[in-house]
Amino acid sequence: MGRLACCHRLLFVCGIEVTKMKTLPLKNPRISQEYGRKSASYKKGYHTGIDLVAGENNKYVYSAGSGTVLRARYQSGPKGADPSGWGNYVIVRQKDGHDVLYAHLSQVLVVPGVEISEGEALGLQGSTGNSTGPHLHFEVWSGSWENRNDINPADYLGIKNDVGPVEHIRKEEKENVERVEVVERGKVFDAIRHNGKVYVELRAYAERDGKKVDWDESIKMAIVSGGKLEEIKEILQE
């Protein structure tokens, strides 16, 4: 990942390609909780996956890629196999080297060791484990799941990491996007570079200074510590 030093001037070093679009694990889903949202209730201090809710009567959960089922845990009852965490869940080791988690399932349709194809059904969306309502917790790890080296699953799927209906990143957007880091006052922020501009996630940038960020869906606007920002914090490259 490239790194940018941010004081009065930014220096672009290098970037990486955005992962090609994958099969969505639910049909016509919306994101109810984005990746990276910070909260003391999370073990790592932030949400390590994305929460997806199926947008139609089809509640089947589909594999985002081809691979082998590492774990498939199911137990009948409202809490499932992991009552305080994932509930009923499936972990797939994909051929691209990523381990992928599908959690809070109501039913599991696969067993450990089976080879699965991209788009194959793994289970049904549910609300087992530590869950407040029906949804799929989708998490992607670089390497073994046991190392918990999570990456942004929205990037992995080729979608935007925003609450609401899933939006695919257009081909021309992906081709012009480079993932970088911004360093400002000793703090490192994940960022993207697009068409000569560098964009930093508003929530991370504001919370660095102890501010609170909420999204008001009714007016489509971020509320930051009582003030309003109509668009994401933008740092212009000089």
Image (cartoon, rainbow, N blue to C red):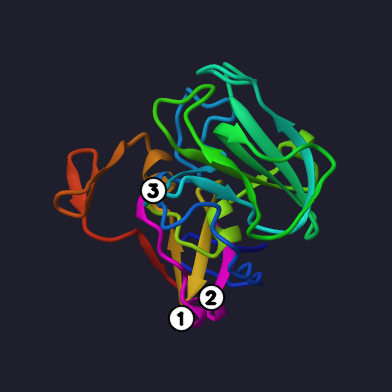
The answer to the question of whether label 3 and label 2 lie on touching residues, with beta carbons closer than 8 A, is: no
Specify whether residue 129 is in view: yes
Can you say whether 149 is above or below 85 in the image?
A: below
* Residue 161 quadrant: bottom left
How far apart are the two marked residues, 3 and 2, measured between alpha carbons? Answer: 31 Å
| Residue marked by disc 3 | 57
Of labels 2 and 1, earlier in sequence is: 2
* Residue 28 quadrant: bottom left
Specify whether residue 4 is in view: no
Which residue is outermost to the right? 113
How far apart are the two marked residues, 2 and 1, measured between alpha carbons? Answer: 11 Å
How far apart are the two marked residues, 1 and 3, measured between alpha carbons? Answer: 40 Å
Residue at horizontal 73 percent and vertical 59 percent from the top: 117
- The image shows a total of numbered marks equal to 3
The three-letter code of the residue at mark 2 reads Lys
The three-letter code of the residue at mark 3 reads Asn
- Across and down, in percent, residue 203 comes to 38, 46
Would you say residue 177 sits in the magenta stretch?
yes
| Disc 1 versus disc 3: nearer the observer | 3
Can you say whether 30 is above or below 71 in the image?
A: below
Of labels 3 and 2, earlier in sequence is: 3
- Across and down, in percent, residue 103 comes to 58, 35
* Residue 209 quadrant: top left
The disc label shown at residue 195, or none? 1
Q: Which segment did they paint magenta?
A: 163-182
| Residue marked by disc 2 | 174
The three-letter code of the residue at mark 1 reads Asn
Judge from the rendering whether residue 84 lies leftward or rightward of residue 1; answer left or right: left
Would you say residue 192 sits in the magenta stretch?
no
Residue at horizontal 57 percent and vertical 60 percent from the top: 157
| Disc 2 versus disc 1: nearer the observer | 2
